[in-house]
Amino acid sequence: MNEASPAGSPGGLDLSRIKTIDGVDVRGKRVLIRVDFNVPIEGGKVADPTRISRVLPTIAKLAHEGAKVIVLSHLGRPKGVISPETSLKPVADKMKELMAGTTVRFIGDCLGEEARNGLRTLRPGDVAVLENVRFYPGEEKNDPNFAKRLAEHGDLYVDDAFSSAHRAHASIEAITRLLPSYAGLLMMAEITALGEALETPEHPVMAIVGGAKVSTKIEVLTNLVARMDTLVVGGGMANTFLLAKGMKLGASFAEPDFVHTAKDVMARANAAGCAIVLPSDAVVAKALAEGADWQVCPVAKVPQDAMILDFGPDSVAGLKRRLADIRTVLWNGPLGAFETPPFGAGTFAIAQEVARLTQEGKLISVAGGGDTVRALNEAHVADDFSYVSTAGGAFLEWLGGHELPAVAALARNGARA
Ligand code: 3PG
Ligand code: MG
């Protein structure tokens, strides 16, 4: 275990210091709420409203309690320049649709005359969505002056943007030094679910980590072997572990430069008593293409011109057997190339098994990351997990044992009050 991090406290933070909005009198107050509306936009419309839906309970609660709710967010990476394709207008339109009965107004700037004028007539219970904070360079620079100008719009600040918690930006970090600051409902749900799964899980606890590359998840793997009882490695990154065990993998993707990392992770796991699980067999094909001819073979016998694209049936059966004894599962990253049929079978089978055990009350399951959530949705089991995070980068930072600037800012603010 990481001794610097007491239970429930990533990076040594005392999360009990974070103030929540419960019981705060917001009537008639201007509440600035930072959310993460960084959602996919296609043809001027929101293509996946998940992040909007997940934050609506906080916005609705504040509006219902008579706050004037002023919503701040980024979208995309406009890098301090006004760019229409990353406008929050389509998101505000979606909000209007989802919050029928509430007045939702879009304001085409987050500062200046336009914002001031738009906000002046806001009534208790109304919601205003300000334009993309990243249209100003001060946002990503965590500029205290930019934060001050934003803070002038509000009496209180609420952070409900867990998926942006790894960014020390002005509307996330600097602003907490200027206004009484609280965590929203989604923020609390995320840090509670992830904290419980990572820091104070019911044992035995298993992490399933997949995805293409070891190189992007070195800290995640290193942190997890110190905390988990079992670490399942899947996806392309499993190939690098198999290489480290001396296997020849035909034309499979792997990162030979990170074989030493895989060896290091295995040595640490061994020392910490964490079992590492790799696939024993695989679905292989000559090309990663829909409908490509495929076959199943042991990972030690991958044909020279074939590549590993998914867990094979023995690996899936073995993992299902292990899951029967597990109490908590933490999942980030698919086990195979699930976007291309039929190479999603392994990921989907395990997702369905984790969902089934969760529904039977045998397992606590927490998943996060864009690809992972997509895979769970394709397997129709996202609703059957105990918790599915809205976060990608922030989820990985947390799994890697890093302090998240937003969470640290909320804890600091709570301690001071
Ligand atoms: C995300 O989608 O992970 C967050 O909104 C953060 O976005 P960013 O990586 O552009 O900071
Ligand atoms: Mg991102």
Image (cartoon, grey):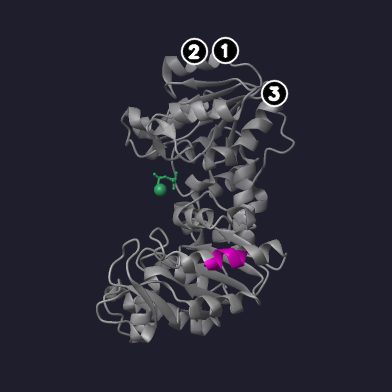
The amino acid type of the residue labelled 2 equals: Asn
Estimate the spatial distance between the alpha carbons at disc 2 and disc 1, rounded to whole Å. Answer: 7 Å
The tag on residue 117 is 2
Q: Earlier in the sequence, mark 3 or mark 1?
A: 3
Magenta segment, which residues? 349-354
Where does the image place residue 311, in percent across and percent down from the top left? 44, 73
**On the picture, is 264 further left or further right than 127?**
left
Find the residue positioned furthest to the right. Answer: 23
SS class of the residue under badge 2? helix
Name the chief secondary structure element in magenta: helix
Closer to us: 39 or 6: 39
When the figure is inspected, residue 186 is found, relative to residue 273, above or below; the finding is above
Q: Is residue 351 magenta?
A: yes
- Could you tell me which residue is drawn at 54 percent across and 46 percent down? 162
SS class of the residue under badge 3? loop
When the figure is inspected, residue 38 is found, relative to residue 119, above or below; the finding is below
Q: Is residue 364 visible?
A: no
Q: Earlier in the sequence, mark 3 or mark 2?
A: 3
Q: Which residue is mark 1?
A: 121
Quadrant of res 137 = top left
The tag on residue 66 is 3
Estimate the spatial distance between the alpha carbons at disc 3 and disc 1, rounded to whole Å. Answer: 14 Å
- Residues under numbered marks 2 and 1 in contact, where contact means CB atoms less than 8 Å apart: yes
Q: Is residue 121 magenta?
A: no
The amino acid type of the residue labelled 3 equals: Gly
Q: Looking at the rendering, in which quadrant would you find the N terminus?
A: bottom right
Label 2 crowd bin: few (<14), some (14–19), many (20+), radius 10 Å: few
- Could you tell me which residue is drawn at 66 percent across and 49 percent down? 17
- Could you tell me which residue is drawn at 44 percent across and 15 percent down? 114
The amino acid type of the residue labelled 1 equals: Thr
Q: Looking at the rendering, in which quadrant would you find the C terminus?
A: top right
Where does the image place residue 77, in percent across and percent down from the top left? 35, 39
